[in-house]
């Protein structure tokens, strides 16, 4: 199974809509010839005016991704783990990807990560798929 890459237009919407629509999408990355993947199972929408948002603290070089075009990744380290955000429509608005189910290894009953990702092209950070692998990944590299 191959996923369909999500373009910038997917993220150029209200963060709440993007957060809902990201559930069930897969993150794929190829490392040293091996595909890694996880299906998104939990997200949160953040707005510039939201005091819990990093963007509410104002623009800095470290937070500039939150003020860039929709689909820009904002990564930071907090509470013992890395945090993954993507910018959305409206300056400072974003979605936090909180948790994902890890794609199983080859030979497991569900398709491996390579089956979730387009293995013939370098994928964008997110691709759409409809899989429900078994293990839950939260706060792990």
Image: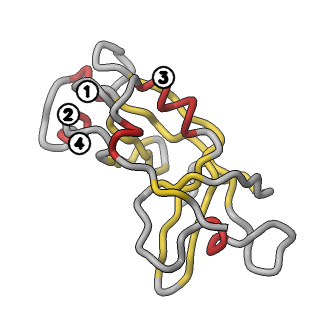
Give whichever of 60, 19 is nearer the camera: 19
Residue position marked by numbered label 4 in the rendering:
65
- Residues under labels 1 and 2: Cα distance? 5 Å
Side of 79 where 133 appears, left or right: right
Q: Which residue is mark 2?
A: 67
Q: Secondary structure at mark 4?
A: helix
Mark 2 or 3, closer to the camera: 3
Q: Could you tell me how far apart the alpha carbons at marks 3 and 1 are, in whole angstroms?
A: 13 Å
Which tag, 3 or 1, sits closer to the chain's start?
A: 3
In-image side of 94 versus 109 (left or right) = left
Give the image location of residue 140, x and y in percent: 57, 57
Q: CA distance from mark 2 to mark 3?
A: 17 Å
Residue placed under numbered mark 3 in the picture: 16
Dots 1 and 2: beta carbons under 8 Å? Answer: yes
The kind of secondary structure element at disc 2 is helix
Answer yes or no: is residue 124 visible. yes
User: Disc 3, disc 1: CB below 8 Å?
Assistant: no
């Amino acid at each position: 199974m191959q996923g369909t890459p999500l373009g910038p237009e997917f993220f150029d919407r209200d963060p709440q809509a993007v957060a809902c629509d990201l559930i069930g999408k897969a993150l794929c990355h190829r490392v040293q010839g091996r595909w890694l993947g996880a299906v998104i199972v939990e997200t949160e929408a953040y707005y510039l005016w939201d005091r819990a948002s990093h963007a509410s603290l104002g623009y800095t070089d470290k937070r500039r991704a939150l003020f860039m075009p929709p689909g820009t990744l904002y990564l930071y380290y907090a509470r013992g783990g890395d945090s993954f955000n993507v910018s959305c429509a409206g300056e400072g608005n974003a979605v936090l990807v909180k948790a994902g189910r890890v794609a199983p290894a080859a030979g497991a009953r569900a398709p491996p990560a390579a089956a979730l990702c387009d293995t013939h092209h370098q994928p964008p950070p997110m691709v759409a798929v409809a899989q429900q692998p078994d293990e839950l990944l939260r706060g792990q590299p």
